[in-house]
Amino acid sequence: MPAKEKLFNQFPPVSTEEWINKIKDDLKGQDFERSLVWKTMEGFSVNPFYRGEDIVRLPHLNTPPGEFPFLRGTYPGRNEWYIRQDINVNDPVAANKNALDILNRGVTSLGFVFGEEVEYTPDLIESLLNGIYCESIEINFIPQGNAKELFSVFADYLRKKEIKEGSVRGAVATDPLGRLMVNGNLCIPVSNGMDYLADLVKSAEYLDNFRVLDINGAAFGNAGAGIVQELAYSLAMGSEYLSQLTDRGISTDTAARSMGLTFSIGSNYFMEIARIRAARVLWAKIVDAYSPTSKDSCKLYVHSVTSQWNMTVYDPYVNMLRTQTEAMSATLGGTDSLTVKPFDSIFREPSEFSERIARNQQILLMEESHFGKVNDPAAGSYYIEKLTASVAENAWNLFVENENEGGFLASLRKGIIQSRVKETADKRKMNIQRRKEKLLGTNIFPNQGDKIDKSYFKKTAGKEESHEVEPLPAFRAADEFENLRMAVDSMKKTPVVFMLTIGDNVMRKAKSQFSQGFFGCAGYKVIDNIGFSSPEEGCSAAEEAGADIVVVCSSDEEYADYVPRINKLLKGNSILVVAGEPECMNDLRKEGVDHFISMRSNLLETLSDFNRELGIN
């Protein structure tokens, strides 16, 4: 019987040089680097393709799941994660009823969120956990203070119910440095806060699978930080905790095992997968430097939360698309637990429908897409392996730079971290304003018929107080666009934008389509037209439509003839806008035509100028 012939032996190998030469031929003279090499926000380059030779020298590729430094996951076997949903505890009985309901609907991790004035009593915990089998799920408590008191009451509950210590999974999510960073203050001096935290860690040491410290890395992402910054500064915060706790007599193993890390997961699909994989490797490297007695202490518990940064109030159902890709990134990267934010969570109390959708997004990934069946699904992908290494290298360099500046707390007090995050956030905002970064429904493809309730934008006045450090506030990429559009929505009469399409058929359609999307982002009423035979006909139709803005859409060559005639016919009754930047632009300006829009326009600034000219504040 003849031996089986391998199919690919029939094809000669193709070298990387041959591939690049073929690509350059197809580019027909265009520069390879400028055309196809992607420069990330983090400052490193990503090639259009990778081959096996690109990852040969990368470390840890042959390390199986469950082995140091945990590139492929902290546990061998499947890629299961906890499906988490948070519950606000205003009434413990109602919260318990909600918890029991969602546990029957696929949730495997509960997050109980408490207000600042809660008194932690045995009755509270009894009511909250009534009927909940703690050994079979993950239990997380998110207090706003008094974490030691909360843990003490919970520990008493576990002893009373005779629940085995090793079977309890979850956390009391304490993070004094994170609160200092976000709020600018702690209610007590930082050193006292670290003493408090050390006592809490010691008291919970006997619970092997229960954490009492959650590094709030999501705060960086929701303030506009890049992926590398969020990773590097989260690691820096974790290193600060390790240093502070070990200085207080706590072993490296106990300190490291007491911590988890929460990331915000954005829409940069492959980069997010790479970030979680890189995080495990870098954290293992940091903990190992503190000489733990067991390599298992170097494992990182990652909780992921879909990003708040890119969620929108207008056209909110698009948020489901965002959170779905974000959930996919988190689970493919090997997150230990995941919270999918309901699509309406940024502007109202989530509805039963939105919470159900958020749960089901994860259940679909686990049960129908089988994301939980394979450990490290990204393993062996040249692209993701190389991306993981690049993210790790750049995050490590920033981490080391931060350590050389004195560590996390010192950098925070100097304002270094806040300044760098703000610089990145400003750059990202500018990219969104210029539509280099797309935000569906906000700066591209707006839902022009969408109207929202004014109450969505109500803001409570914050108390004026001095800060120990400059706060790192969360905000959303769409905030400024939504404020602009809300101002338009509040007007009794919506401004009318009239497309005066004339001349070259192809160019007028293209310019009209662009202009409709441009002005639609402000919520103006846009009237399109199939084309006019003369400026007189177009201006007459614009006047009849009550146009506040008239956009001339034609070819650049025809503007020199059409625009001056249209300008005279309008007699200043409407704002005249030219779609494009024709060569005759300076001549048209001499004719009194001041408004031109193009792909190079700053969308937000331009629309804000039109609002002001229309008397909209």
Image (spheres, rainbow, N blue to C red):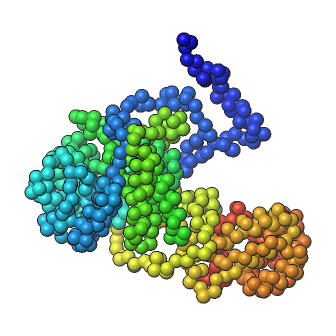
* Count of marks, rendered view: 0
State the residue at coordinates (26%, 57%): 140
Q: Position of residue 314 (x, y in %)?
A: 54, 71
Question: Residue 414: in sight, yes or no?
Answer: no
Q: Is residue 386 above or below residue 441?
A: above
Question: Which residue is pictured at 24% across the width and 51% down the height?
Answer: 136
Q: With respect to residue 166, does 553 lie above or below? A: below
Residue drawn at the location 66% of the way across and 43% of the way down: 36
* Percent position of residue 603, x then y: 65, 67
Residue at position x 35%, y 66% in the image: 183
In the picture, residue 359 is in which quadrant? bottom left
Decide if residue 145 is on the left or right side of residue 25: left
Left or right: 27 as drawn, with respect to 179: right
**Which one is nearer the viewer's eye here, 22 or 616?**
22
Quadrant for the C terminus in the image: bottom right
Front one among 77 and 293: 77
Q: Is residue 274 left or right of residue 505?
A: left
Q: Quadrant of the N terminus?
A: top right
Residue placed most toward the observer, 563 or 334? 334
Q: Is residue 130 left or right of residue 385?
A: left
User: Along the line of sight, which residue is nearer the eye, 239 or 294?
Assistant: 294
Q: Residue 122: percent from the left, percent from the top?
A: 13, 65
